[in-house]
Amino acid sequence: MKKFLLLFTLSAHFVLAQFTDIHIIKEIRSKDRGLVVSAHPLASEAGAKVLKMGGNAFDAVIATQYALAVVYPQAGNLGGGGFLVGVKNNGEKFAIDFRETAPEKSSRDMYLDNKGKANTELSQNGRLAVGVPGSVAGFFATLKHAKLPMEKLIQPAIDLAEQGFALTEREANLLNSQMQFFNQHNTAKTAFQKEKWKAGDVLVQKDLAETLKLIQKNGAKGFYEGRTANLIVGEMKRGNGIITFNDLKNYHATERKPIVFDYKGNEIVSMPLPSSGGILLAQMLKMSSFENLENFQQNSADAVQIMVEAERRAFADRAEFMGDPDFIQDQTSMLISDAYLKNRWKSFDKNWATPSSAVGKIISQTKESTETTHISIIDKDGNAVAVTTTLNGLYGSKVVVSGAGFFLNNEMDDFSIKPGVPNMFGAVGGEANSIKPGKRMLSSMTPTIVLKNRKPFIVVGTPGGTTIPTSVFQSIVNVVDFKLNPNLTVNLPKFHHQWLPESVQVENGFPEITLKLLEKKNYIFEKVSQIGRTEMIVIDENGNAVAVADGRGDDSVAME
Ligand code: GLY
């Protein structure tokens, strides 16, 4: 049996955890070399390898994403979509939207039965849950900012898929936990199905390697046309899927203007609609600044109350106003204006929890688990990139494209399938996020770069569905207001509130005194095992960078 060596660095301490040939590195400091942080050590290494070959941060982010599609199949993907925020060393800021779209045969009420009841089983699992994938188009849209040819950037992923890689215990357990769903939703055997995976087993993905080679040879057409398109449409026909050749051929990634705003002398650059992330982040940071958050302690009752109330008001707006800006009136400027937010903040009462009904119309709730993944990168020349990408749920729809070897997303569930019916993250939405052919579903992904004196200061993001914007919010205030070091910022217990449900989620280990004080003000808490997996790089004014991979998973940093 293969021996393993898992190497963790936590706050600069090295702890030998268990034997594996995968090196998990939790923190690296560097002054003049590029850094890559992602959910998997082999993906971070793929990015670092490309930096060593002379690539820039944008080359590295493409290589890391392809590698994640192989070694992190629960969220890394070819069959999903995402958002990228980039800042170049010449000051150029840009955002790439490669979110999935609703297929041409989709319709507003496609998940309602004849009694008008929403069927979330159909929007969350199987072929009808799949939006038209955007990731490969996103990688090609990013290439415009890169230096190396795509053939080189995709090669590490091809090698990993062909030669295989050893699973960690966490990965083996995760695959085992989903086996019944893989069996239920796939008609042919996939690389992921086996009686029982264990740590050290090698996952080889020959079909995926062939798909990657087609992209290497034919560009985006290697995915959206020809053999791969045939296999995707063929997979749709094995069940109730509706994606057509037209849907695939017509898919395009879009470059958008990022949301840019000032927070206490720092310039925040984040994702605009169709992700709600940047708007929510601006709203939460600005509202909490009305109460001078910097005067309080991190995770103290005062600070948590202010931040929860900012989250409550921002998420109520998300449900009412936000959706794909190509289909709805974009109200971003109004929503992040000081005048609007000051008015919204008038109902804040430091003696009492504001009832959610006071800031938006109440609808009942459920919620489920979250999966997505984030990459933060800087290069030695001062370029920075943050990308968050997803299949939506864990392994998306659980459907693997037979012969092509990759999971398809279940992103259709991020639409409001019936206004008022919560999605898998418990988020409700209204007409602004209703299903229409070609429309992108509202997201919470919040890839963010903070600039100080026009240079990258923080590169940050996380998975976690609706907990994404609130985690990024906490990451930024932890550094800017509470002056915490990056390791504590990432690893201390977090909290999350989203207007509905009324309760506040807190990670195990959250200070009990804070909970007790806030319970007296009518706050309700729900303990959860984990919120997000933050990948963060912080660079000081002298160019000293610290990259931290979240301790909640196998996340890892690599250096050029
Ligand atoms: N599917 C999670 C998100 O887009 O926010």
Image: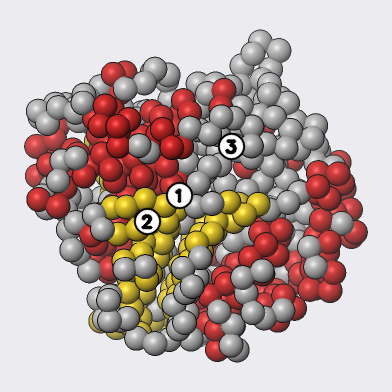
Q: Secondary structure at mark 3?
A: loop
Disc 1 residue: CB within 8 Å of ligand 1: no
Q: Dot 1 lies on which element?
A: strand
Instruction: Where is residue 137? Give x, y as percent.
Output: 71, 58
The residue singled out by tag 2 in the image is 268
Q: Is 137 or 11 nearer to us in this picture?
A: 137
Residue at image position (45%, 83%) is 380
Which residue is rendered at x = 36% and y = 61% of the image?
450
The reply to whether callout 3 and callout 2 are in contact (CB within 8 Å) is no
Counting residues from the N terminus, which is met first, the one under dot 3 or under dot 2?
Answer: 2
Q: Which residue is mark 1?
A: 259
Q: CA distance from mark 3 to mark 2?
A: 21 Å
User: Which colour style is shown?
Assistant: secondary structure
Label 3 near ligand 1 (CB < 8 Å): no
Q: Is residue 489 left or right of residue 183?
A: left
Which kind of residue does numbered mark 2 sit on?
Ile
> The disc labelled 1 sits on which kind of residue?
Ile
Instruction: Specify whether 470 is left or right of 195.
Output: left
- Image coordinates of residue 204 in percent, x first then y, are 70, 73
- Could you say which quadrant of the image residue 198 lies in? bottom right
Determine whether, in the image, residue 215 is placed left or right of residue 267: right
Lower position in the chain sequence, tag 2 or tag 1: 1
User: Which amino acid type is shown beneath numbered disc 3?
Assistant: Pro
Dots 2 and 1: beta carbons under 8 Å? yes
